[in-house]
Image (tube, grey):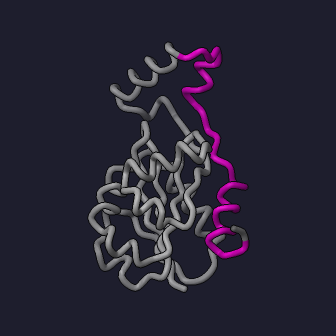
């Protein structure tokens, strides 16, 4: 079974998660950054793993564009979505899939899940820092400084996702 692992990353967390995932998935696979992908990228694959960070409910821009542009071909494949974001709420994650693709695609996807996410305040743009500062001021959390350097990526969730892709779990 040939697998294409298609990913996008802005700050590197998703790439780290994808590298870990690739150590765990079975069979032949090709790892492709979305800016290098075209329609032929997924043509001969049996399954597609899409790995994307989530930024304020949005997929990585290139992933979102690729999914919409290649929806017809993606609907012919087994598709799995690994999201890097802080929430693990399935209802919310499902909303992200619908918002960034379509309800039809959401129904087609075999599994979607979050493996956690990370935030390193120092690497953000000026605008992103202002947004984070605003959100943290409005929140009720007293650990504001800790949240600026949050990392809740879970290796066990990456393993669980790989087990699903490998057919070892449902």
Queried whether the magenta region covers residue 147, the answer comes back as yes
Q: Which of 27 and 107 is in front in this view?
A: 107
Residue 136 drawn above or below residue 8: above
User: Residue, x 40% and y 56% (percent of image)?
Assistant: 103
User: Residue, x 50% and y 65% (percent of image)?
Assistant: 109
User: Residue, x 42% and y 52% (percent of image)?
Assistant: 98
Position in image of residue 10 (x %, y %): 40, 47
- 9 left or right of 27 in image: left
User: Residue, x 46% and y 54% (percent of image)?
Assistant: 52
Q: In which quarter of the image is the N terminus?
A: bottom right
| Magenta stretch in the rendered image | 139-168
Q: Nearer the viewer, residue 63 or 119?
A: 63
Q: In which quarter of the image is the C terminus?
A: bottom right
Residue 9 drawn above or below residue 85: below
- 45 left or right of 170 in image: left
Queried whether the magenta region covers residue 92, the answer comes back as no
Position in image of residue 93 (x %, y %): 52, 47
Residue 123 drawn above or below residue 65: above
Q: In which quarter of the image is residue 87?
A: top right
- 49 left or right of 125 in image: right
Position in image of residue 112 (x %, y %): 55, 58
Position in image of residue 135 (x %, y %): 47, 21
Number of numbered tags placed on the structure image: 0
């Amino acid at each position: 079974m040939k697998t294409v692992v298609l990913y996008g990353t802005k700050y590197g967390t998703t790439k780290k998660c994808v590298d870990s995932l690739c150590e765990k998935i079975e069979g032949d696979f090709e790892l492709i950054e979305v800016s290098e992908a075209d329609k032929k990228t997924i043509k001969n694959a049996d399954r597609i793993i899409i790995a994307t960070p989530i930024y304020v409910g949005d997929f990585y821009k290139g992933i979102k564009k690729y999914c919409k542009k290649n929806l017809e071909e993606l609907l012919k494949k087994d598709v799995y979505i690994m999201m890097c974001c802080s929430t693990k709420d399935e209802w919310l994650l499902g909303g992200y899939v619908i918002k960034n693709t379509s309800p039809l695609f959401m129904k087609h996807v075999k599994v979607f899940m979050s493996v956690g996410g990370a935030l390193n305040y120092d690497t953000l743009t000026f605008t992103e820092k202002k947004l984070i500062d605003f959100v943290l001021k409005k929140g009720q959390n007293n650990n504001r400084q800790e949240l600026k350097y949050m990392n809740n990526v879970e290796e066990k969730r990456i393993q669980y996702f790989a087990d699903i892709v490998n057919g070892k779990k449902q």
